[in-house]
Amino acid sequence: ENLHESFWNSFELELSKDPPNMSVISARLKEIKMMLLDCDKTLEEELNNNIDVPFIEEMLNRGVIDDKYIYNMCNYIVDIVKRCNSESQEITLEEFRTGMNEQLEKGIMYKEFFPIFFRFLFENIDDIKKRKEIYNLLKENLEN
């Protein structure tokens, strides 16, 4: 638990530097893509077409951040997590999306937004993977 908290604190500190270390955002995006592929291998082409990490890195490095692009990308990622998740999590994900969109529309600083965004998604995707493992184990046991 302490290591987990330390990771997210470090992430937030990197974004709070002057100038901010925006490379941590692209690193988390790459991780999100890999985690989603672990949930559903058929997503690879779709994720590559919709989460253009090199474009995002260039945008972040130049300091020319397109807020609408970020808004759309974040909503797209929530949509993918929702598709991979069970119906029981739908309300939680929609509540998160509503809050996320409200914060983005109000102009939340990215150094505050991205730690919350990525942490929520990482935890949700971890839960998806755990449930998938349990399902596969139960299925295997029933077949034997």
Image: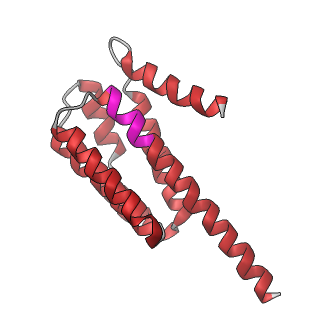
Q: Residue at x 34, y 26 (%)?
A: 111
Q: How many marks?
A: 0
x and y, in percent, of residue 95 in the image: 33, 55
- At 44% across and 30% down in the image, what residue appears? 24
Quadrant containing the N terminus is: top right
**Where residue 110 appears, x then y in whole percent?**
29, 30
Which residue in the rendered view is the most extreme toward the right?
144
Q: Nearer the viewer, residue 78 or 46?
A: 78
| Quadrant in the rendering for residue 38 | bottom right
- Relative side of 88 to 72, left or right: right
Res 73 seen here: no
Q: Quadrant of residue 78?
A: bottom left
For residue 41, above or below residue 63: below
SS assignment for the magenta stretch, majority: helix
**Residue sitting at x 67%, y 66%:** 133
- Seen as rendered, the residue at the extreme top is 18
Query: Can you give x and y, in whole percent of width and height, for residue 132 in the image?
Result: 61, 68
| Quadrant in the picture for the C terminus | bottom right
User: Which color scheme is applied?
Assistant: secondary structure
> Residue 55 versus residue 112: which sits nearer the camera?
112
Where residue 89 sits, quadrant-wise, is bottom left
- In the rendered image, residue 63, in percent from the top left (x then y), is placed at 23, 25
The residue sitting at 16% across, 40% down in the picture is: 105
Q: Is residue 72 visible?
A: yes
> Taking 93 as reference, is 66 left or right?
left
Q: Looking at the image, which residue sits at the far bottom? A: 143
| Segment colored magenta | 111-118
| Residue 16 to residue 5: above or below | above
Residue 3 shown in magenta: no
